[in-house]
Image: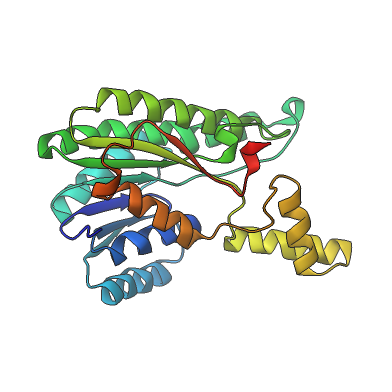
């Protein structure tokens, strides 16, 4: 399943799911363009350690994905610095929780801009480059909320449903160009952000972290087990492999049975 000689741009890849994806692709030999926010020194350490561990080239660009011009520049830079853009993983996202009548306008705009519009702009920029090479893999990180809804998450649910629809559309357009386009729909993923959420619940409820983790999972998932960033990364790596060359236009669940209800 070697991806040696391929270049992967992974948005939101300085931590969490995105970093798990970047690591999995680097482990298969792909050169990596990282993107995200964070402490400059820590990101540089991450960039250098990732390259050293897997023997690949790793670059970083802190483009603001709410700005279409910066997305275009990011894609152009990935090709200029690393030689091509063969794999695009649209992972960056944010969340806000509130009832519709209280949902701040600015939060709606920000979530739609990053979680949905950025996916459009990145695909629009990358597809012509992939078509020229006759090969490409696009993986959009949607969510179980791209397939079903939960209350108080109107912007996130709307954006992720939109990502699934956009994925299907571009897959159809690229079906005979050597390019596959798929969406992954995770349930609960054990990221540092989720770990902090569980710890806060345990402190508030005066329970254990283990009890709160199971309670959180049980709200949505029949399987009381978290997906890890590494497992998401392995899923992405499979979709980029030759074994998955006819998998396209799919919204693929990795959610502990969430949407099986």
Question: Camera-side residue: 63 or 1?
Answer: 1
Residue located 76% across and 47% down the image: 219
Q: Position of residue 58 (x, y in %)?
A: 26, 64
Looking at the picture, the colour scheme in use is rainbow
Front-most of 224 and 131? 224
Q: Is residue 186 above or below residue 118?
A: below
- State the residue lying farthest toward the right: 206
How far across and how far down the image is residue 221, in percent?
A: 68, 47
Q: Quadrant of the C terminus?
A: top right
Q: Residue at x 17, y 55 (%)?
A: 81
For this view, does 108 lie left or right of residue 113? right
Q: Which image quadrant is residue 210 in?
A: bottom right
Q: Residue at x 28, y 36 (%)?
A: 246
Q: How many marks?
A: 0
Which quarter of the rendering shows the N terminus? bottom left
On the question of residue 106 being in view, the answer is no
Q: Quadrant of residue 247?
A: top left
Q: Answer above or below: position of 119 versus 225.
A: above
Residue 208 seen in the figure: yes
Quick check: 160 left or right of 27? right
> Looking at the picture, how far across and down is residue 130, in whole percent?
18, 38
Q: Judge left or right: residue 75 versus residue 98.
A: left
Tell me the quarter of the picture where residue 34 sits. Answer: bottom left
Viewer-nearest residue: 152 or 219: 219
């Amino acid at each position: 399943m070697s991806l040696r000689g391929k270049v992967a741009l992974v948005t939101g890849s300085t931590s969490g799911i995105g970093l798990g994806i970047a690591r999995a692709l680097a482990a298969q030999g792909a050169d990596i363009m990282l993107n995200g926010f964070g402490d400059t020194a820590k990101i540089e350490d991450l960039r250098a350690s990732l390259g050293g561990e897997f023997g690949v080239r790793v670059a970083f660009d802190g483009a603001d994905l709410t700005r279409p011009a910066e997305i275009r520049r990011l894609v152009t830079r990935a090709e200029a610095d690393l030689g091509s853009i063969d794999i695009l993983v649209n992972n960056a996202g944010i969340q806000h929780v509130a009832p519709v009548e209280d949902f701040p306008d600015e939060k709606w705009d920000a979530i739609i801009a990053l979680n949905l519009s950025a996916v459009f702009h990145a695909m629009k920029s990358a597809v012509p480059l992939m078509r020229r090479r006759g090969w490409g893999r696009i993986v959009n990180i949607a969510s179980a909320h791209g397939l079903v809804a939960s209350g108080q998450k109107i912007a996130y649910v709307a954006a992720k449903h939109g990502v699934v629809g956009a994925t299907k559309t571009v897959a159809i357009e690229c079906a005979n160009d050597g390019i596959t386009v798929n969406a992954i729909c995770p349930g609960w993923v054990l990221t540092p952000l989720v770990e902090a959420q569980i710890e806060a619940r345990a402190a508030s409820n005066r329970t254990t972290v283990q009890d709160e983790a199971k309670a959180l999972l049980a709200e949505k998932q029949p399987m009381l087990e978290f997906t890890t960033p590494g497992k998401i990364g392995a899923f992405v790596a499979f979709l980029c492999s030759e074994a998955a060359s006819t998998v396209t236009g799919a919204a693929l669940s990795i959610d502990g049975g969430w949407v099986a209800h």
